[in-house]
Each structure stands twice: as C-alpha cells, then as structure tokens.
Amino acid sequence: MEKTIDKDYKPKRYFFQRCNSADWLWGSLNVIGVVYALSQYHMLMDGYEKAIIICAGLALISFGWVWQSIKLFVVCVTLVSLFAVSRYGITIDLGKSDFFLKYMLASQSAIMWMSALYVMATVTYFFDLLTNKPFSGTVATSLTWTATGMGFIGLLVRWRESYLIDHDIGHIPVSNLYEVFILFSIITALIYLRYEQRYNTRSMGGFVLTVISAAVAFLLWYTVERQADIIQPLVPALNSYWMKIHVPANFIGYGSFSLAAMVGLVFLLKAKMVVVAPQGFLTKRLPELMLLDDVMYRAIALGFAFFTLATILGALWAAEAWGGYWSWDPKETWALIVWLNYAAWLHMRLTKGWRGNPMAWWSIVGFFVTLFAFLGVNMFLSGLHSYGGL
Amino acid sequence: MSASVDSSFRPLSVTTLLIRFLGSMNLAITLLVAVAIASIIGTVLQQNLPYPDYILKFGPFWFEVFKSLDLFDVYSSVWFLVILGFLVISTTVCIFRNTPRVLKDIRDYKESAQLNALRRMSHCHEWQSHFSREICLERINVVASAKGYRLVVKKEAKHLIVAAKKGSGSRLGYIFTHVAIVIICIGGLIDGNVPLKIAEMTDNIQVETRNIPASEVPLISTLPVDNLSFRGTVTIPEGQKANLAFIDFKDGYLVQRLPFLIAVEDFRIDYYKTGQPKSFASDLIIYDEALDAPLHKTISVNHPLEYNGYTIYQSSFGDGGSELRIKLWPLKDAKLSDEIQAVVNTPVALSLEKGDMTLEILDFRPINVNPDITGVKQFKNIGPRFQYKLRTATGEATEFISYMMPVEKDGAKYYLTGLRHTPAEDFRYWYLPADSEDGVARFMRFLTLLGDEEKLKEIALSTLPKQSDSLLPMAEDQELVAQFMVGLVKQFVDGGVGLIAAKVKAVVAPDKQSEISALYAKVLHHFLRNVYWVVLQEEGVDPTSGLNAFDERFYEDAVAAVSISHQYDVPVYLDLVGFDHKEATGLQVTRSPGKMLVFPGCLLLVVGVFCMFYLPQRRFWVIVSGSLENAQLFLAAQASRNPYEFEQEYSELEKALLLQLEVAKTN
Ligand code: HEM
C-alpha cells in the first residue's frame, strides 16, 4: 500500500488564516458600526465612553469569531432594535399607538415576550428531557434564543426610550434592580446556550432555565407590584461611564455562578440516579458525570474571572465616586465573600483535586451566597449601594 | 499535616515545619474562610455606630463583650488585621515555595520522560507509519505548531522523543495571581488605619470626642501634614476656607492638617425636570504656597480633584449657616406675634411667657422633592423646609420639621409641621389650614381666641338667646351656661374630643352617655362656629352673607387642627417667612499611597486569572522509533486538570497526526 504525502498540507497556523469570509464580514460590520457611532455621536461621548465603545466593538468581533452562532443572533437583534427605534422616531408617544411597538418591540412589550418565551422554553426543555424527541429539543433551543433576543431588544430599546423621555434622563439600562434582572436572565441564557452547543446536550436546559424563570417571576412581580419598569433618572453617584462596564461584568459572574449551581444540581441528581436507578431514563438522558463536572468547572472559572474583573472595576469606580477603593460597604464586602468562596472552590478542585458530590454541593451553596450578595444585601443591609433597594 | 510514620521518617527542623505550615493549602483555605466569616460579621452587625446605639440594642453586657472583641469595627480590629497579615505571609511563603517549581515546569519540555511513564498515561496511541523518521518529524512539527504547541526533539540511542507543550500561561497565571494578592493586601494595609491604631496604642494620639471647634482640638488629637495615608471629611460653607479634615476614629474623631487651603466659592445642585437631583457640584479654589496661582476647579460626584497626591471628592452637602426670618406665634396666649432672625446651627434664646426656651435650627433645605401623594413615582418640589429643636430650660428637647409653603391635599392647602420627641420616632404631622392669604394668621387668631376665657365668655353670652325672647334662663343661669360652654371649649383645646368623652364617661350614667355626648358635641360646635364668626368679623367678613365654601372648609380643618393641638405641647409656633440660603459642601479628602500598589496589583490579578483559566498547559510526547524508512510512532499525553476538555483536544490532535502520517494501525 503506497501512500503519497499531501505536499500541499499547510496548516493554518495563524488566527487570521483560519478566518472564513463570514468572519471577515463580521469584523468589517462591527468596525463600520463603531465608526458610524463614533462619527455620529462623538460630541455626546467623553473619552472614556469612546474607549468603551471601541473596546465593546473589539469584544463583539472576537466573541463572534469564537462563537459562530452569535453572529446571526447579534445581526438579528441589531436589525430589529434599529427597526423599533425607527418606529419611535423622535417621540416616546408612539410607543402606545404604533402596532409594532405596542405589541412587540417597545421595551416593556419585548420584556414581556422575553418572560413568556423563557417560561415556555423551560417547560419545553423538561418535556424534551421526558420524551427525548429531537423536535422538542430544537424548539426549546429556538425558544431560548428568541427569548434572549427579545431581552436584548427590550434593553436596547429601553436605552433609546430613556433618551426619548428626556435627553437628560437617558442612560444605559443597567441602573436598577429591574434592569439588571433582565440582564441576568439574558446573560445566563447566553452562557447556557454556549455550553449546550459546545457539549452537545440539551438535558441541562430545563434546570438552568428554571433559574431564569425564577428571575422572570421576580421581574413580573416587581413590575406589577412596584411599577419598577418606569424609567427613572439616574442618581448622581451612578452617573458614570464605570456603570457601563462594572455592571455587565458583574452579571457575567452572577449568571455563570447560577448556571454552575444548577449544573451542580443536575450532577447530584445524576449521581443519585446512577445508584438508585441505573436503568432509569434520567440516568440515561442526563449527561455523564464527567461532562457535568466539566461544565460546572468552566462556569465557575468563567464567573470567577469576570467577577474578579467586576469587583476590581467596582473598586476603581468607588475610588472615583466615594473617595476610596475599598470602604467595607456591605455590597463590596459580600462581593469579597462570594469571591473568596469561589477562590476556595477553585483551590480545592485544582490543587487538591476534589471532584464529585462535595463540589456540586458547594457550587449550590455558592449560589445562595451569590444570591445574598445580589439581592439580600439590598434587602437586609444598608450601605452606600442602597440605591438598589427593593 | 501529620507526618506519616514510615521508615524514612526523620524529624524536621522547626523552621521547615513552620514554613510548611505557613505555605500549606490548609492554612490558606482556613484563612480565606476566616476572612469571609469576619466579613459576614462586619456586614450583619452595622459598623461604627455611636456606642449608645449598641448599648440600646444589645444591652450593657453584650455591648461590653462585643466591644472587647472589636465587633463594632471589625475591619480595623487587631484580630482581623492579623488574619490579613497571615494571609499575606502565607501567600508569600506559598509563592516562594512554588515559584521555582512552576518556573521549571514552564521551561521544561520533559523530553527525558521514560517510555514506561508515557505508557502509563491516560491517553496513548501506537502505530506504524509508512514514512521515514525524517518526514514524520517534519509532519509532527507542522501539526504541533498549527495547534499552538512548541516542541523539542531528543535523540536517544534507539529512538527520538518529541516533547511538545503549550499554554504556559496558566502556570504564569498562578504566579501572577498570588503575587497580586500579596501586593493588593500590602497596599490595602498601608491605606488602612493600622498606623493610627499603632499610634493610639502607643499613646501618641488620643481620640477627641467633644464637639468643639477645630481650633480648640488639642495637639494630641491632631495629625500632622506629613501623614501619608488618611481619609477625612470636612464641611465648608460657601465663601469659606479650611485647611483641615476630620477623621472618624473609634467613638470620636481626629483632626488632619492639610498643607493647603481649600476655599469653596459655590455649591450647586442641578435637578432633573422631574425634580430629583441630577448632580452635586462645588467650585473650589486651592491655595498653596507651592502654586504660582490659586488652582480653580469644579468637582462633582464621580469627578474628584486630584492635587499633589491628595484627592478631594464631593461627598455630601449641608447647610452652611443660612439666615432664616421666623415669625413666632405664641400658642394659646394673647401675646402678639414677633419676628426673629436665626442662623442654622446657632442656638437662639427665646423668652416666652411660659418660660424661656432655646431654639436650635438643625437644618434648612430650600428645595424638597418628595414623592407626590397623587401618583406612584412622581416627584414634586414642596418648597423650603427647616428642622429645629426647642429646648426647655431643663434641657428637654422636642424636634420639629416645618415647611414654609402650604402643601395641597384634597383641594385645600395646609401648613405642615412634624413633631417628635426622640430621633427614633417618626414625625407626626400637624396640618394647619392656610387662610385666604395663604398664611396661618386666621388659624392663630382662632386658636388664640379659644384660649382667651374672658373673650369666650363674652361671645358665649352675646350669642345666647336674649331672655325676652323666650322662657329661657335668667341672667345668672345664662352666666352658668356661658361658663359651661367656655369649659367645654377648654376641654376641647386641652385634650380634644377624647378628653370631653372621658369626662362624660366619668360623671354620666352609662345609659345616658351617648345622649349627653351628642348634646355636648352639638353645643361645642355651635359655640366654636360662633367663635369662628367673630374671627371672620375681625377680618371684615360680612356676617349676613353666610359662610362661603372656602371659609366652611377652613372651619372644619381648623377645628380638626385644634382638636389635636394639645399634642403640640410647646407654647410657640414657628412660621418661616424668609431666608437667605447659604450652603456648605461636604468634601472628602484622601491620601492613599497604597493605590500605587493596589491598582497595578489588580491589573496583575485580572491578567493572572484569565491566563490561569484560558491558557491551560498541555503536553504530548511522540516517540519515533522503528526503522529509518518506516517509522514506528507512539503518542502519549496526560490531562492534569481538565480531563473532559483534554479528551477533545487529544482526539483532535490524534486525528490530525493520523491524517498527516497516514498509517496502518498496529493496535
Ligand atoms: C486569596 C486569594 C487566592 C486566590 C484568589 C487564589 C487563586 C488560586 C487559583 C485560582 C489557583 C488555581 C491555579 C491553577 O493551578 O490553575 C490557585 C492555585 C494555588 N494556590 Fe491560590 N489563591 C489564593 C491564595 C492562596 C494562598 C494564600 C495560598 C497559600 C498558601 C495559595 C496556594 C496555592 C497553591 C499551592 C496553588 C497551586 C499551584 C499549582 O501548583 O498550580 N493560594 N490559587
């Protein structure tokens, strides 16, 4: 058996050699977007904001390069948001009369769609787990993508709406509990979708989406009971470019930690089922333990990295707004507690090689610590961060 | 750590043991947990409140216990700092112990790996190639570098070992993060108040607890200009200067001298159209001998001034000694009203008929944006407001809050004054109806008249039906009836309807009570109405025209206000009629050289953490043996950290190698 050497074999060594035309198109679109935004609105931005928009563009480009599916998603979200913004024109009033806005794309409507779709996705994922039909799985995934898209559209349109109400009031919608709950839902969902694709399994979906549905339930209660959806002007302390980076970084952390906790739950369930009912459908359908363990680790690592970044950004902001980078304010302190907790988790896993049930339990406990840092502090403790109160 | 008892057991020196202990993971985790627990305590127990608050909350016993454990100031307590210190030491030792190994690991390709060791690895694969060793080597090189590996080749007697690795970033990441933690902690400790604590323990400083002017604070409570690190606050009224700041410390404060003067030209609050504050800003001038010309700068929240290592922040605001013109309405006695001038935060003596009092104005705010009572989340400016205390000669004080303009409620306007006896209470509000001139004059005349028994009696007599008209009582009986009516009014003023009801209950048989009460109420209202008429007539209202709707409503509100007037137990009502507003800006002045360590440390931490997670170290080995023309290949790799992910990586690597070195498998 004579073999010839493939003389033309030239591995694509460098990153740019590996880019396909979609990647190049993606890069150019983003560059055009950023350049356009800068040329149109540079007089409204200070140096930091210009830097942020450029970095955001770069981040989006690399994000799209790393994760192919996100490209189409971003394009759709952008087009629909632009459409919504164009329906508004220059006055907020159309939100109540224009068909598209009133029923779909005004931020409040979009958020309602997002909420409904997430709940439907949760149910469908569980249905899929029970029946294991390929079709239901596809539906569940599409619902999650759509819901996440609606969430992003809702936030983007809300951003515009705040400027339409009054130029003075305009601000990025990550300034209060209502807005960050939306952010939490969509970020958690995106991270989940990424893992779903990467590990090619849908059986964790229902569990992860349960957390999102819980967030949605809170959101609805908050809207109905407290009219939290009304756009409020910023308090002076929040009026800073830091908010634009500190808050999203934080929520990548919170989202990943929540996801890790739910995956920990699936891990415990599977570990139990393997023993109790080795032939049961859960044992068969839930992903193997090693995969779950890996997802859990990845989520915590991602969360830890971004939470570190967010806490540091918070400290830098505090240095500018409160006069000290660290004041032992309850919110700060709880961020530290969350951070220490996951640092200990990572040490145990990476240096002591802990695996299995204890780590899964720990990640669930970690979720409650995180939850307290996120909500409990606002509810029970007072401090400089008190603007987020319930 | 327990030393295992095996044959090679040999006692270790104390230093080695100590170093091992300090650098051990167990200690590190324990310390991390200890910091976390201490932090939780510090957030659950509110920190740095005045001591009396704690005594009230926990009782004297637990107060002493908590205080001796420093639980009221956890983050600067000695034990907490000791934990942090140990964390720094432990991490440092850990770095020193591990760095050589880590650096070696980064540099080392492990090309001397033994075949046996490689065979035991979790991933291996052996096959026969149809290519020469030469070509195999070349191809392995191409595949490896395409996947980001770098490799070395080692020639052995019978075979070649290709050792490849990538992603040393994670190992560097370990060094970066741990060094960063040490740097950040050291920076933080420099900026914390360790030096102050030491100075206090060695009696070099003494905390000042008295409320005295800064110029009278003794030297022992004053920190010199060359203090490297501090965080102080100072409130400066517009148009004034200061060259010091106050540092809160324990249950008092210290004075920090500054090497420059801060003058405040103006303080401003901008508002959104909705009325909520949008920004707080101060125009400052820094006077410093080192400057050629004074430095002018406007600071606002999120935009501090950096000057010469000092940073000046907008942190709060307050009253800078506004001058208020206040009309005094003595309550329930006939003295005429009087106007005084008072300055916020400067006590004024008031000589009143019922004893002298001191007026202490605590605060004045020209604009008060409150949630509108008509709708959710709507805000409305309800005008200037001042807050004050009235203190009797015996020192008892009642606190008030009072609005200058009437507030609209249900279509009528009222003057609001809130009152409370202790700061723990909520203010209870007294609603005085505004008269047709938007003032309180008519109400005051009404109330004064209700306190004037002689006048009341006159009115009672004059409004009783004349004896000639009917069979009604004779003059002396009329006198008695009038007396009764005046008494009724007195009870009403002194205790509201409650007092009247109580009196009725005390003297009337139970079955008659409701009847009598109804009668009393009727008489009272009839009489109050007549008194009100007299007030109106004094204003020049024509009695024949009857009450218009406004006057009618006023009457009802006035009676309601009178009925609770007894709760307003001071003899004077203060009516703000004019003001000259002067604001003060609250500045925070800090000097934190630790920043120079903390911020770069943070950067190192972030870089380190991302390296650690996203540049995992990977290695593989290929042993090329067999004949020169037909090489025999053996691929081996081991996952240290992330078996699952490595699985994928390995299978791709294997696929690529197989593709390039197309071969017949031997196993
Ligand atoms: C407080 C903050 C700390 C954080 C956030 C932190 C974080 C980490 C992380 C994430 C790792 C895993 C790195 C890897 O190998 O992939 C690690 C490893 C390690 N940490 Fe820490 N650490 C901290 C403090 C300490 C302390 C105080 C010690 C010392 C006693 C310590 C000792 C170690 C050791 C020995 C390793 C394993 C290094 C190796 O062989 O790779 N860490 N640390």
Image (cartoon, coloured by chain):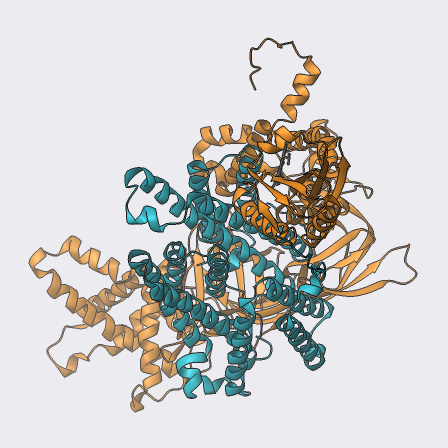
Chain colours: A cyan, B orange
Kindly indicate the quadrant of the structure image that contains residue A249.
Answer: bottom right
Q: Position of residue B647 (x, y in %)?
A: 54, 46
Q: Is residue A116 left or right of residue B439?
A: left
Q: Position of residue B478 (x, y in %)?
A: 20, 71
Outermost residue to the front: A1
Which sits in the foreground, B31 or B354?
Answer: B31
> Quadrant location of ligand 1?
top right
Quick check: B197 above or below B543? above
Residue drawn at x 63%, y 73% is: A26
Residue drawn at x 19%, y 72% is: B522
Kindly indicate the quadrant of the structure image that contains residue A5.
Answer: bottom right
Q: Is residue A16 left or right of residue B290?
A: left
Judge whether residue A224 can be spotted in this image: yes
Residue drawn at x 60%, y 58% is: A246
Quick check: A274 above or below B304? above
For the C terminus of chain B, give its image quadrant. top right
